[in-house]
Amino acid sequence: MSRPSPFGRGQGEGHRLFLRLSLLAVILTACAPSASSPTSDVNALFTQAFQTALAQFQPTETPAPTDTPIPPPTAIRTPPALPSTFVASQLNPLDTPHTYIQDTCEYLLNKWSSTNAAPGTVVMVIMFHGINKDSVDDPSDILASDFRKMMNDLKDQGFEAINATQMADFMDHNAKIPSRSVLLISDDRHQGEYFNDHFRPFYEKWGWQAVNGWISLEDGPRAISIDANIALEAEGWLDHQSHGYIHNINMGDSSTDEFIKTEFEKSIADLQTNFNKTPLAVIWPGGGFGLRPVQFARGYGYRLGFTINPRGPVMYNWIPLADQPDPARPAYLAEGYVNDPRMVIPRYWPYQVQSNIDTVRNIGNEAAAYAKQNQPIELEYYDILCAPTYGAIP
């Protein structure tokens, strides 16, 4: 078994150095002159030889590495706080805008896509119960002459009519529609003559479509109007949507499941059979609705629901509703609690249209200006948090 070197660390090189110096010492001693020579000369030679040998074993100096600059860490971008929801001063204080798109990135993508409707695009929904040629006894009706003036005023103010599918696509995805749009809904399955007399002239002049809230109960009025309405639907400008089956009994949270199902299922079956379509909108009979009827409607595939509450116009992800009853307007049922704004969309009565055209137009203009003001903030937010997943906004 070998004994450990006495030289510790670097023992190999140290051991060899020791042997060489020892050998050198022996040689120098052997070659040393006689005793008469001075001892100091031998010592000097030995010292010189030792220093020479030692110098050969000094470690070579390694040049210090050149410092490589380290780039600074990438700055972490903090997303800005998003602006609050636009509030229109023209609305009743109890009618506040309700949003419904939960995904902020989806909302901003739809809002700012150049292929979609521009911010501030507004829809005025109008309901008609009767257009009378001679006199008006019911305040919900309108004289034919006033109807024609109303339609011309809407056109003069830059409005264009859309159908229910366009409305649903706009409300769901901000699909492109005219920046000032109007949805004309006539309740209660009028006869073909009614639409030919009053709505057809505006379809032929401007391409304006209308919606017929169709009651599906098999009774006398239906038998009179069914054939003409089928023909008008086939022409492509009268859009039939659901107005219930029995219709004259409102749906609400006290309604039985069987009643609600009958109202939807028989209406859907009727429109599929006679109008070759599945309805996407329910015009709530009597303006009645509730949490359960709304849930049933969604279950059957409905995308829109319309009340008789004239709270204001609507925009993408922006619907004015009330969260509590208003003693000053007891007939207006509060809608906020259903938590589905698209299923309780407000409508204007005909007598309110003339006085509210400017209001609707101004709300759209103000919303557009507010959006423009906040565009840099919203686009920066989208770029930081949304673009990595959703991609760039078209």
Image (cartoon, helix red, strand yellow):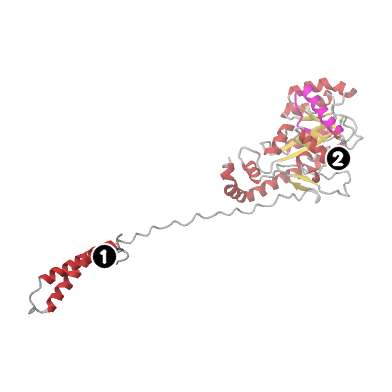
Q: Which of marks 2 and 1 is in front?
A: 1
Q: In this view, does 244 lie to the left or right of 108?
A: right
Write down the residue under mark 1: 14
Give left or right: position of 183 versus 59.
right
Q: Which of 68 and 329 is in front in this view?
A: 68
In the figure, is residue 29 to the left or right of 378? left
Task: Work out whether residue 331 or residue 323 is closer to the camera in this orientation and state it.
Answer: 323
Mark 1 crowdedness (10 Å alpha carbons): few <14, some 14-19, many ≥20? some
Look at label 2 and name its amino acid: Asp
Compared with 233, 298 (above or below) is: below
User: Which quadrant would residue 110 be assigned to in this image?
Assistant: top right
The disc labelled 1 sits on which kind of residue?
A: Gly
Give the quarter of the image for residue 258: top right
Residue 190, percent from left and from top: 85, 27
Position in image of residue 169 (x %, y %)? 69, 35
Secondary structure category for the residue under label 2: loop
Residue where numbered disc 2 is placed:
253
Magenta segment: 258-281
Q: Do the residues labelled 2 and 1 touch (CB within 8 Å)?
A: no
The answer to whether residue 187 shows anywhere in this view is: no
Residue 269 shown in magenta: yes
Quarter holding the C terminus is top right
- Quick one: quadrant of the N terminus? bottom left
- Residue 263: percent from the left, percent from the top? 84, 31
